[in-house]
Image (cartoon, rainbow, N blue to C red):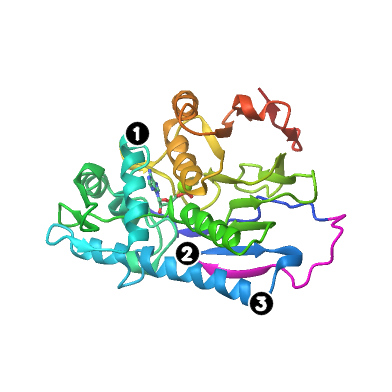
Amino acid sequence: MIKKQKLLLIAVLVVVFFNLTGCQQKQKIPPQTQMVLGTVCTINLFEQGSPVVYAELFKELRSIEQKMSMHITDSDIAKINKNAGKNSVKISDETFFVLKNAKEYAIKTEGAFDPTIGPLVALWNVSGNENFGDSPKVPSFNEIQKAQNLVDFQKLELNEQEKTAFLQEVGMLLDVGAIAKGYVADVLIAKLRQKDITKATIDLGGNVYVFGEKQKNTPWVVGIRTPSFTEKTTLLSLPLKDTSLVTSGMYERYFEENGKKYHHILDKTTGYPAENDILSVSIVCESSMIADILSTACFVMGKEKALSFLAEEAAERAVEAVIVDTQNKIWFTEGLKHKITVINSDYTLQ
Ligand code: AMP
Ligand code: MG
């Protein structure tokens, strides 16, 4: 008999710490936090913050949520989903840009990242979203197979000229949950540049952007959380500036059934939450959107494949990664050598 389901943890709890002690200048108004895109979003503009700028940035966040949330009825994504197998849909330039990148990386990652993962996300409903029915439970084999058959990025048609999108089969569903927060962070940073703001930290539920430097010639110190269901401690820290750090981890959203935990990052080849030798993947990249895609994709790939994929990707753009495996070992790419400080001594640097 299936035990009563329990949604154990939804909020992505602080994976990041910004060492703010010793800031020379006085902060005008404190950092601002709002719930957007189903997650806790915090923006800190330090001494350059003003109510007007904060309001503008959160307005931008909400406007993107209105276009890309699959749970908002008239969003671009919801419209594409509703018209699956029927009509192509005219969408905003922003959603088109996100979908174009999503498809490109679905091809590159051979579907480890797949924006048409929606039917499996809806079936598992790990987050317990009321639009997807009851509390989460392990689906039947038949249900999984049926949903799996509807996941196929090759059946997402995009028309660049017309700015339209079309899902070829009835029942297909787009879910941009593994890319949208990264995209939003990039848009916010572009806005800050336009306004000549030189320093900020943005934390969109664990998708972090550190913009500028903490102080002159002093980088930010960013922490990565220990990948544990129970332990909310910092695993390691690394100095960063003008870049994004995005982590995908099994501890972020999950439910438990018959003593087994099921998390939110799904492997379309099995139809189940990805299960391999990885506990968490953190990607450092100037584009938060790419970091977001890659963290999810690498999590699904497993360590060996992820590291070789990242080496190929590094030929195209600057990208670094920290991978924590099931043996409590911390793997990292060349560019992070001598930069990582391990804080949790249960884990060892490779
Ligand atoms: P992230 O936290 O960025 O790794 O994204 C996870 C979210 O993306 C999940 O909550 C799903 O909405 C969606 N998702 C789950 N598995 C995949 C996948 N293999 N490819 C693309 N999106 C996924
Ligand atoms: Mg992601």
Disc 3 residue crowd, few under 14, some 14–19, many 20+, Cα 10 Å: few
Q: Is residue 258 visible?
A: no
How many neighbours does mark 1 have within 10 angstroms: few (below 14), some (14-19), or many (20 or more)?
some
Q: In the shown orientation, is residue 221 left or right of residue 303?
A: right
User: Alpha carbon of mark 3 to alpha carbon of mark 1: how far?
Assistant: 42 Å
Please report the bounds of the magenta region as a residue range. Answer: 21-36
Residue ID for mark 1: 108
Residue 51's tag is 3
Q: Nearer the viewer, residue 195 or 183?
A: 195
Asked if residue 33 is among those painted magenta in the image, a careful observer would answer: yes
Residue sticking out furthest to the left: 86
Where is 58 relative to 112, above or below?
A: below
How dense is the environment of label 2, judged by Cα within 10 Å: few (below 14), some, or many (20 and up)? many
Q: Is residue 117 left or right of residue 299?
A: left
* Prevalent SS, magenta region: loop
Quadrant in the picture for residue 32: bottom right
